[in-house]
Amino acid sequence: MSAQIRSQVASAVQACEEKKGEEISILEMEKNSSAFTDYFVICTGRNARQVQAIADEVEMRLKRANVRANQVEGYKQADWVLVDYVDFVVHVFSEASRKFYDLERLWKSARKITLADLKKPAARASAARKSTSANTRAKTPPKRRGSTAKAMSRKGSTGTRRRKSS
């Protein structure tokens, strides 16, 4: 993901922290999943007023960076406020709603990351993911290419090995 988006997500997380949001989670969605965004920021407020205050702080902080929310839903009810920035979505829940909807379980294929991960340069984070997948590939035995073709060329048309005539 671009460094700019990562920076915006980090700002949203810091806004949640500033307003004492609890259990803050950052989910990086898989590119091949059916997700409509790149990141989810999820946090909990203890009461309706705090839920609104967290959502307000996220919006204010990102407006200062000239980033405006595409859509805000659930603000008046303050049970689950969704602030949509297209590339990432901030979910601010009441305790009961967070347990009920359990987005972390619903999107369990997403990679859970930290604020420190977001602050790393994107190239380094990407390289870390590639090295992890390279290590996984290194553990599997390499495929032997061409050995089947060589074995087939030594066999006759019936698939059995030809004997040398003495």
Image (cartoon, rainbow, N blue to C red):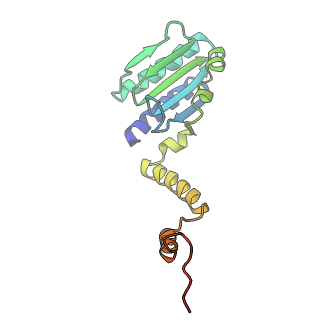
Q: Is residue 114 above or below residue 77?
A: below
Q: Is residue 55 above or below residue 65?
A: above
Q: Residue at x 50, y 35 (%)?
A: 29
Quadrant location of the C terminus? bottom right
Closest to the observer: 7 or 156? 156
Q: How many marks?
A: 0
Q: Position of residue 153 (x, y in %)?
A: 47, 74
Which quadrant would residue 22 be assigned to in this image?
top right
Q: Is residue 97 above or below residue 148?
A: above
Q: Is residue 66 left or right of residue 154?
A: left
Q: Position of residue 133 (x, y in %)?
A: 54, 54
Quadrant location of the N terminus? top left
Q: Position of residue 80 (x, y in %)?
A: 55, 15
Q: Residue at x 56, y 28 (%)?
A: 17
Residue farthest toward the top in the current orientation of the protein: 76
Q: Position of residue 159 (x, y in %)?
A: 54, 69
Residue farthest toward the bottom in the current orientation of the protein: 166
